[in-house]
Amino acid sequence: MDTRPSRRSGGAKVAVWLLSSALVLLLAAGAWLFLQYLAAQDRILEQDNKIQQQRELIEEKESFGAAMGTLMTTTEKFDAVLTASVVPWETYERLAERAWTFRWDVAELAAATDQVEFETQQLEQAWAVAQLEMQSNASGSVYEAVIDSLGGGFVRSVLDNESCDGGESVLGCVYENDPLVVHFDAAENTQPFMTDEIRTGIAYHEFAHVLQFTNPEASEVAVTSFGGDWEVMADCFALTYLPGWALDHVVWTSSHEYWEVSIGHGVTCSEPQRQAVRDWYGQVGVQPQTIGTEH
């Protein structure tokens, strides 16, 4: 039996340990590289998303600009329209302000673009309806013919009963909350003293109220020439622009019967007041404006 002590190799142990350490380091390095790769991929994806968002933002800004350009072009049709409120410039200014405020928000910009397109559709519809109104006289009345002529089709006339407050003497009226509709009293229209001349004068008077409501700023200045009396101002409009019109009439209904008819509020305006009406009438109507110039 060999009783010599056995010898174990310490070098083998060291080699195994070094190999294990190297493997651990290699795995760690691989894991680190993999994590770096994933981080790089995340950064690339994030950058791609930002680029896509920027692209969408640019496209939406271009869409809004194009929509606003179409709206402004559409408003040019209305330059000669006397009822200024038919083109709501303040609404358009608010939309431009909204687009500027949310210029980095794609969803808000898209919503603003949709609203601008809706406003364009509203204008186009108003224009189309006005053209049809000008081409027809559904009621066959003098009232409708005169109002269509004065309002360019943008103002409707209605012959009805009990629409106007103020008693039996009220022949027509216009309401501030619905200023593009003129109501004429159907019962008074059948009175024996009612002539086409008187109907025309009444229509001119009521159309003046339409202009007062739809051109508030210019009207507030003009009415000061009448002591703040809107009715006397409306009478003066008819006296100024309807040739031969007077507030007092004698209407013969037969060879021996006649009516003495007073239309209006009993005040025949002076020449300075008529000039005030002319100045006012020259200022009313849709005025071209530029939207969004502050930015």
Image (tube, grey):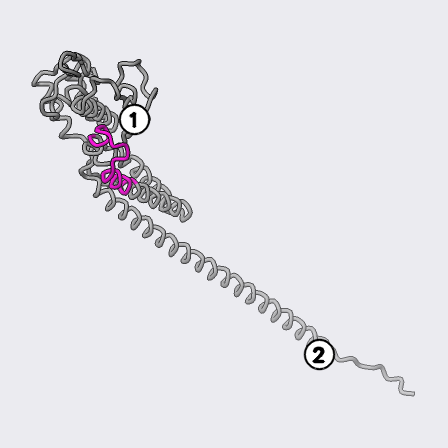
Magenta span has 159?
no
Q: Residue 23, which numbered label?
A: none
Which residue sits furthest front? Answer: 255
**Relative height, residue 260 to residue 159 (above, below):** above
- In the image: residue 23, left or right of residue 267: right
Seen at 31% across and 48% down, the residue is: 67
| Residue 71 % position (x, y) | 28, 45
Amino acid type shown at disc 2:
Gly
Amino acid type shown at disc 1:
Leu
| Residue 90 % position (x, y) | 29, 34
**Relative height, residue 246 to residue 41 (above, below):** above
**Label 2 vs 1, first from the N-terminus:** 2
Q: Which residues are magenta?
A: 126-146
- In the image: residue 115, left or right of residue 210: right
Seen at 11% across and 18% down, the residue is: 273
Viewer can see residue 219: no
Which residue sits furthest bottom? Answer: 1
Q: Residues within 10 Å of mark 2 (few under 14, many from 20)?
A: few
Q: Residues within 10 Å of mark 1 (few under 14, many from 20)?
A: some
Picture quadrant of residue 31: bottom right
Quickly name the residue at label 2.
11
**Most foreground residue, 86 or 19:** 86
Q: Residue 159, which numbered label?
A: 1
Quadrant of the rendering where the C terminus is positioned:
top left
